Image (cartoon, helix red, strand yellow):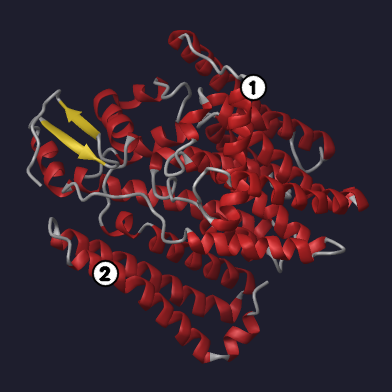
Amino acid sequence: MLPISLLKDKFWLFLAIALLVVEWSMPMVAQGLYAESHFYFSVAFSAGWTGLITALGLAFYVTARKNAQLASLAIVLSLATLTLMYRTSVSFVQPQFTAEDGCVFFLQQRESGLSAFLIPHNGYYHTVVRILAALVAPVPTLFVPAFYNLAWLGIYSLIVAYILIQYPDRKWAPIVALVTAFVAHTCEIFLVVTDTIWLGGLALTTFVLFPVPDLKRWARYLVTGVLLIFSMSGPFSLALSPFFLLRWSMNRKTFPLIYVVAVILGALVQMSALHSYYVDKNAGPSLTLTSLLLCLKIAVIRVPWSLAVGYQPVDFYWLIGLALTLILFVFIAREIKSNPGKHIFTIGCLLLCAVFVVLNFIRISPPDVLVPLVNGDRYFYIPKVLFVWALIHLAATARTPKPFYLALFFCAMGSMAEFTTSQVVVDNHWPRYAMLIDQGGPVNVPLNPPGWSISIQGASQTLPK
């Protein structure tokens, strides 16, 4: 656990945290104050998020005196939220749709209602996103993107809380949980409701890797329902079904068969959708020797290399990354060989990391779609998290932990190198377009990233910027 006794005795530490909150919040408040298009809208959201962080700080202060576990949870969730606010500040103070959030899920919910649940996108179902879109449908159009952001943040917070509570090593649990926010990443999935499928994949992965509490019957049914929903959100249940079956076979007392059935059922639904998609498109993954080498190159650059040094030009750098990765895996193999039973978690993380990387290349054909380093990083978010988790577990349990501490140091440096990296967000004057949508007038709404748009009633009317 975090050193709560120290925090209770040192008032200046509370003051330092408060100053940190102010320091990180003020740039976003300033950004809202100087937004040209919707001054009061941005000010309101800036004030709202500042109030949220203040409330989290007060919760931390109160719970630190009474309950150490709740205090740790408050601290970790506060740090994770602050990190997301820092890395995606525009999404917090100027909420607006991103890509499929608007032109697919918002639009289809508006036009088709509940029947939108039966419409696959990119070959598979997005049940979580459809549920969020249906729940937010009664909200005034102006606030729909903000509620999408809140929904994303809520799902993410639940995953972080589960990691913090269930990770066996209490000392490392906060760091393991915060990896999900701090990992070197171009922020593609952060606060994008379409990309909750990656949160769903992370949730399923966490459920396989971490100890599952022995729950009462009603709680088991609730968990089963959640697993089924996540399994029908994205293609990850196809890859994780064998791992759920393996987990059940290893521990049948605390891992009910109904969990496995839920995930396999979701996988079968997604498999049916994917089959229809590839038949309709007359397309499928085709690998040649050249494409296999390209896949290896992308995998090395995207996961271990970018974790250590951030994104560098492709060229010959990937060969350096490959060499260093092979050296690291020599140390990992030696450590696992010395005591395999002690490193089940490490083996699981690395195996799942490899599975998710391979899954990306199976889904995307041709693989050179992922060559540009500025795009497609969302496909490697889960493998990155898993790779860092494996290093943390090795650093905590290895006989000779120095190589893994060194690797974690480089991961921290790589994260800092990419910490300010975010997707380019253009102010598309969402409040003005929301007003036109509510008035029922035809309108074509520009979205982020540039080139995306929503066409309401098949119109082409736009507003001047």
Select label 1 or label 2 by which is in front. Answer: 1
Q: Nearer the viewer, residue 46 or 393?
A: 393
Q: Image point 52% across, 55% down: which residue? A: 310
Q: Is residue 15 visible?
A: yes
Where does residue 247 sit, x and y in percent of width and height? Answer: 77, 37
Residue depicted at x 62% and y 65%: 174
Q: Residue at x 11, y 43 (%)?
A: 435
Measuring 31% from the left and 50% from the top, which residue is drawn there?
424
Furthest-front residue in this view: 316
Q: Quadrant of the N terminus?
A: bottom right
Kindly identify the amino acid type of the residue bearing the numbered disc 2.
Answer: Val
Q: Which residue is mark 2?
A: 29
Relative to 170, is 244 above or below?
above
- Viewed as shown, does residue 261 lie left or right of 107? right
Q: Of callouts 1 and 2, which one flags the residue occurring earlier in the amino acid sequence?
A: 2
Residue type at the position of mark 1: Leu
Labelled pair 1, 2 in contact (Cβ < 8 Å): no
Residue 97 screen position, x and y as percent:
28, 43
Task: Pick whichever, 136 or 106, lies toward us.
Answer: 106
Residue 398 screen position, x and y as percent: 83, 61
Are there few (<14), some (14-19), or many (20+) residues within 10 Å of tag 2?
Answer: many
The total number of labels drawn is 2
Q: Residue 289: which disc?
A: 1
Secondary element at tag 1: helix
The image's mark for residue 3 is none
The CA span between labels 1 and 2 is 52 Å
